[in-house]
Image: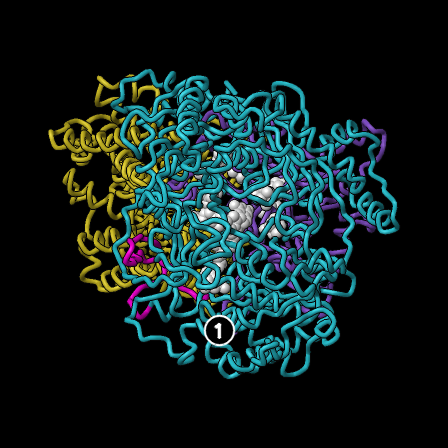
Amino acid sequence: MDKSDIGQEERLLRPIQETGRGFWIFAGTLLAIGAWGVFAWFNQLRRGLDVSGLNVPVYWGLYITNFVFFIGISHAGTLISAILRLAHAEWRRSITRAAEVITVLVLFFGMSCVILDLGRPDRVMNVLRHGNFTSPLLWDVCSVSLYLTASTIYLYLPLIPDIAILRDLIPGRRWLYGPLSLGWTGTPRQVHLLDKAISVMAIIVIPIAVSVHTVVSWVFAMTVQPMWHSTIFGPYFVVGAIFSGIGAILIAMAIIRKAYHLEDYLKPIHFNNLGLLLLVFSLLWFYFTFAEFLTTYYGGEPMHMTIFLSKTEGKFSPLFWTMFVTCFAIPFPLLANRRTRGTVWGCVVASVSVEVGMWLERFLIVVPSLSNPRLPLTAATYIPSWVEWSLFAAFIAIFMLLYAVFTKFFPIVSIWEIREGRESSVREVSERVESYLPGGAESAS
Amino acid sequence: MSLDRRHFVGIGLGAAAGSALGVPAGRLFSEILSSANNSVYPARGKEGHCLSVCSMCPGGCGLRVRKIGSRVVKLDGNPLHPVNAGRLCPKGQAGLQALYHPDRIPGPLRRVGARGSLASFEKVPWERALEEIGGKLKALRADGRPESLVLLRRNGTDLGTRLARRFAEAFGSPNDVSLDRGDEAAAIALQLGQGVRATPVYDLPSADYVLSLGGALLETWNSPVHTMRAYGAFRQARTGRRGKLVQVEPRLSGTGASADEWIAVRPGTEATFGFGIAAVLLAEGLYDKEFAVDRTIGLEDRREAGGAVRPGLRSVLEKHYGLEKVAAETGISVNVILRIAREFAAARRSLAVGSRLGPLLPGHLSEHLAAHTLNALVGNLDQPGGLLLSDDVPLAPWPALPAGPAAASGRRQPRLDSAGRGDFPLLASDPEQLAEAILAGAPYRAEALLILGADPLLTSAACDRFKAAIEKVPLVVSFATLPDDTSLHADWILPEAHFLERWDLLTTPPGIPYPAVSLSRPALEKPLRDARPAAEIFLDLSRRVGLESAFPWKDLPALLRSEMDGLFSARRGALMGTPFDEAWIRMMEGAGWWVPGYRSSDELWQKAQETGGWWDPFYDHGDWKRVVRTPSGRFEFRADVVAQLASARPDEASPAAEPARPPGSLRLLLFEPLSISGGTGAELPFLQGLLDPGEEERWETWAELHPESASAIGVKDRDWVRISSPRGSIDARARVGHRVVAGVVAIPVGLGKAEGGRWAKGIGSNPLRLVSGARDRASGLPDFGATTVRVARVSGPKRASSSERRA
Amino acid sequence: MARWGMVIDLDRCTACQACVVACQVENNVAPSNAGQAEAGRAISWLRLVPIQGERRGTRPDLQLIPLPCMHCSHPPCIKVCPVQATKIDHEGLVSQVYSRCIGCRYCTTACPYTVRHFNWKKPEWPAPMEETLSPDVSVRPRGVVEKCSFCHHRLQRAKDKAQAEGRPLKEGDYLPACAESCPAEAIVFGDLDDPRSAVVRLSQSPRAFKLLEELGTEPKVTYLSKGEWGGQV
Ligand SMILES: Nc1nc2c(c(=O)[nH]1)N[C@H]1C(S)=C(S)[C@@H](COP(=O)(O)OP(=O)(O)OC[C@H]3O[C@@H](n4cnc5c(=O)[nH]c(N)nc54)[C@H](O)[C@@H]3O)O[C@H]1N2
Ligand SMILES: Nc1nc2c(c(=O)[nH]1)N[C@H]1C(S)=C(S)[C@@H](COP(=O)(O)OP(=O)(O)OC[C@H]3O[C@@H](n4cnc5c(=O)[nH]c(N)nc54)[C@H](O)[C@@H]3O)O[C@H]1N2
Ligand code: SF4
Ligand code: SF4
Ligand code: SF4
Ligand code: SF4
Ligand code: SF4
Ligand SMILES: [Mo]
């Protein structure tokens, strides 16, 4: 593979090769927010969770909300890209990497949220030492670590050929790309192995991803608490996760496209296709939410109704109806309409709205059930403290920063996959289409 | 552990990577995390126990004090003690927080700056403090004005109080004033009917039906633990029988919530309800006729020697307490009144109890009189399940005071508070009048004021008057253990030792049917914070003032020992013991035997320290000479007083015609939550944390309103309101609900202290600042219920915290 | 083997809260203050919670229920703990291993009775109040969860004493602090497996009920409802 090979894809390397002032300002700002978060965190370490707004009986709040939210977003990448890969959706080629990076990073932050929430973070290793396998929290630890491992591998494998390109292209960074490229030279045997590995990983990663959010939902559903103890929580959470995940990819794509002038790679058709997917999930989300709330309402069990009412007309109702609007009322018309769906702004507005809505949904799952305990105690209102908000902000900032840094070291659109697309998939697709048609040749795949 | 930390540091470093903080993160982390761990508090020394008596209230519960080395770590009830049988109330449980309170007075303090702040005081050694105070007192005596010494004190049978009173008497002062008149109304009612001035004892465990005319039976009544134990027995201890409790009151108190029935009368009409029941009993012939004929007088009209007809109770009740009238006045339907009356008459052993015991009640004499009347009508006097009277304790009396002309003439001077004279002959103490007399300087000036276990600047019905009065007295000595509102204005603070730091001997607490003597020895070798027992201080002062002949004891144990000898020579009673011992002794004494469990005075003294004390569990029912000491030798239905009280009712002229008041103008109704009753408790964080279990209120003052009253002034639950009267105003959080009847605002007393340590200072507000100076016409006790206040919404105080409790 | 349980007779209980303070003193619960209470930081292993009974007309039928840990036979709190920091022992006591707890507060959210408490901050006893600390009960560090232990240190003490006296444990040897203090003698404690014990006799009363029994937690705390005049005693 020589340099001239990437001629056409040269634009994809530009972010790695040159860094403007804008980037430094951007990174500096994010770093400042991150540093503020570190300060807040030190504060919490020194004074304990007293600095949070948590109380009796609202023992869980923003940190756990964020945990569920981040883990949800993690479904962006690996799951979507794996499904699209397996489905041979050709339009995926320019978006898979962007999605996979989200997954790996955000999982890390999701895990960190749990650590933040611990009263004794210094004892976190007790989970290994005294692990209790009846605890859904431990299932979580397992499935999230597994997912993190699998999706890291799944991010890494398709990176190898690109790393090799960079190794050859940028001698100054050989120290980094050299070892990472694992001696990739693009021999047919290597290509075959890589193909195989990617396919296998894609298959493995899907059930793991589904399991992750199912297990996250079980953290709640396995308790007997009203409006947590629900059998549909597994699929409901998974759907919500993919929903917010797609939103996240769309937002990331829009930013990358704009920042790195990749209009040519991230085209309206990509937005349209992902937008369609988002539309489907918005409908699914609506279906699940409706089913969940209707059964609760119809059953009318007093304990459940207390919480139901606190959401629909009580003190959480402003949040609840905002959630409904942002998860459904805004994205649905925007995405159902072909004209808005086909535009970047249409998808971005819908996606941002979905992110807000899905965060609220997580919050509304965690907090109201705890705010209304079965036995009438002095119940408190939970208002997150500055420390919690700061850490939330810092997590998002550091996530964005790391994401941006990633784009400075690795192509955010997979070079070799695009190239492969150019070289072989047109032919492959036409063969495939032919194979569908009567009289066409049998296809292997 | 260290492995944990290292792991964590690793993770922490990862997350903090890129952070701008240029600190050696590893070290910082270890330091931060070790701050999460507590230093272990080692158990130095061996475990041990000693016995004491709780003095957090007049209840007199026996304590079993658990010690580890020299530390006291837990107070439990003394299981052998007849008052509480091993049980304690929350105040007693929290007693250690008072002992080890961080804000205790550090030692004798002399005021060197302006009044009103602890910062104005400087510490002086005991010797100098006592020398100076003793010198001044001595000069007063030498000057021939011993009457100008005033003792303002708690009500108690503890040694410190008893010696303080003796000191005042020996000094030559008539001014022994009690601020606590909790039992006065009940005692006055008893005096009117039975000719005995004592606190009545209600035999709850044997009763089947209790009609409580506003009594806080299950909260602050008499000796609270004893009463609650009795209530437990009344409810669930007898096979086949469960008592019924009917609570008549305008605010659903804790007692009302536990009762089987709450009769929500209009405020101030409990007595009307009681007399209404009595009228029904008489009208329907449902009273104990035999008892009425044999043992009472004044039921029927009587022709006097002169020919005038003296109306009896029957005709007075007929005249003033007709059913319809009572119903209209109390707001309770005729049917309910009739039903309660018939239930009361039909129950095997029914008992009526009077109002709350405190001076916080309006018109309480009438309620006690109504209860007393009802009890006499069902003939339960001195019967099981009825109204009993405790017998005296046969302690050896102290030697008579040595004769001294100066002291004698001082004692003959009129009391400054005029108690027992003038308008209110039945009053034993009148602190509000004392404040006025001090301010007026008449009939003579007060030169020295000793304040023992009382906090009039907070707790008196005339707290503001006391604040002014105190400045007129040249020498004010407070004995407060913890700084209280009054001590801030004193010239000297001589901290009294906590009750776990002193010897003591207490006699029968109010409400206990059996004579009992509790002995208490110090649990700590010496008082913390350089405090001293009041008894010791007065012994010392007596020497400096030249009264040693009146105080002939070498030390406190010697004093107690000599008192206890009287118990031995009385040849009755026994050591405190188990329920089995109790039954045995009772049986033997009933049969005329004496089985004390000790053979000598020495043995009694020793063993009393191991069991908690002495008592005599045998009760001789129907000893009429002892319990009825009227001139007629019979129980007297005081139709005259009933008639006087009846015509004094504000609405007697036009029943049910409540004067039209503007909305927001409500009647003030005060109550004492158990945990901060009697003016103390708010200093201790455990007690502040449980002010009221029903309203979920902690650490703040609240005001209960009926929804009707609240909506009239646009107040919603949990709003802040300002309550104002002509005397002053306070802020509180409104709690709107059906716990109170319409037209009143109910506020707890006990908070709003200017001092009292870090947990009490500045928390809540004191509604006594609102009360009018009105008095109960019959007894002269302050009538707080006569206060009309205005309630209006205000914006709440700014709160530092981010959360608020659910409505 | 004994199975410890408690009966609380609501017909006797006067809601005085002596049990609440007794528990705090016995178990080294740190004192709180106004700000902490307001922020929901105060810890109390035993609280009185108002249960709204039937309303008689517009009048409240206020029932206050002392609420310790139920020491469920099927405790939902134990299953969820990721580090086995809360356990049920062979005598049915649900205990807490403070040194192991990571403070995730999963148990607090899983317990349907909300009787578990988290140490939001380092507990503090302003000097000299630390003198009151009992050596039998550990002082919990910041960041861990704690709850009513049925005063199990008292069981150990009672066992030691019985052994020293060479006799088996008998009824009344082991009494939690709350039961010991209750003025109305509303709290009865004992062995649910001993047919002669008072707790067994009382829990067979027709007045007996358990809280949230429908959740299948099998509480070992039984309540006796308010009686009727002339009704069951
Ligand atoms: N543990 C403990 N017990 C104590 C004390 C203590 O310090 N600690 N102190 C003792 C002393 S000194 C005293 S004086 C007593 C005080 O004890 P109580 O005499 O019981 O005093 P309160 O609780 O203030 O009683 C006031 C009650 O009367 C109600 N109330 C107010 N206005 C009216 C009215 O017009 N009619 C009726 N019927 N009710 C009304 C209020 O709602 C409240 O429930 O407690 C004694 N018991
Ligand atoms: N705010 C408020 N006012 C009240 C009441 C109330 O509950 N709250 N209750 C009313 C009633 S019923 C009564 S009887 C009176 C009682 O009122 P007071 O007679 O004033 O009695 P307390 O307020 O109980 O105690 C007075 C002071 O004694 C201190 N003290 C406690 N123990 C000791 C001790 O061992 N030695 C010494 N020297 N001091 C000690 C306390 O800290 C307190 O400051 O108040 C009445 N007024
Ligand atoms: S009733 Fe009084 S004496 Fe008895 S424990 Fe309570 S405060 Fe102490
Ligand atoms: S009451 Fe709660 S804490 Fe106690 S055992 Fe049951 S679930 Fe666990
Ligand atoms: S808070 Fe502690 S006891 Fe509770 S589940 Fe977490 S680790 Fe277990
Ligand atoms: S059993 Fe012990 S730990 Fe539990 S509430 Fe009672 S006193 Fe507290
Ligand atoms: S101590 Fe007894 S009477 Fe008082 S609240 Fe507790 S259980 Fe009820
Ligand atoms: Mo009193």
Above or below, comparing residue A43 to residue C60 in the picture: above
| Chain letter matching colour purple | C
Q: Position of residue A285 (x, y in %)?
A: 37, 59
Q: Nearer the viewer, residue B38 or B143?
A: B143
What is the quadrant of residue B585 in the picture?
top right
> Residue at (63%, 28%) from the top-left corner?
C136
Q: Which of A45 and B771 is in front in this view?
A: B771
Residue C88, picture quadrant: top right
Residue B181 location, x and y as percent? 50, 50
Q: Is residue B479 rendered magenta in the image?
A: no
In the rendered structure, the colour chosen for chain A is: yellow
Q: What stretch is highlighted in magenta?
A: B711-739
Q: Is residue B626 above or below residue B51?
A: below
- From where the camera sits, is residue B244 visible? no
Q: In this view, does B32 lie to the left or right of C115?
A: left
x 80%, y 37%: residue: C169
Instruction: Give the residue number, with chain letter if any, for mark 1.
Output: B646
Q: Which amino acid does label 1 sit on?
A: Ala
Q: Residue B88 at what x, y percent from top left? A: 62, 43
Say which element carries label 1. helix
Tell me the quarter of the image containing the N terminus of chain A. top left
> In this rendering, would A333 be left or right of C114?
left
Q: Tell me what hue chain B is rendered in.
A: cyan
Up/down of B258 relative to A48, above or below: below
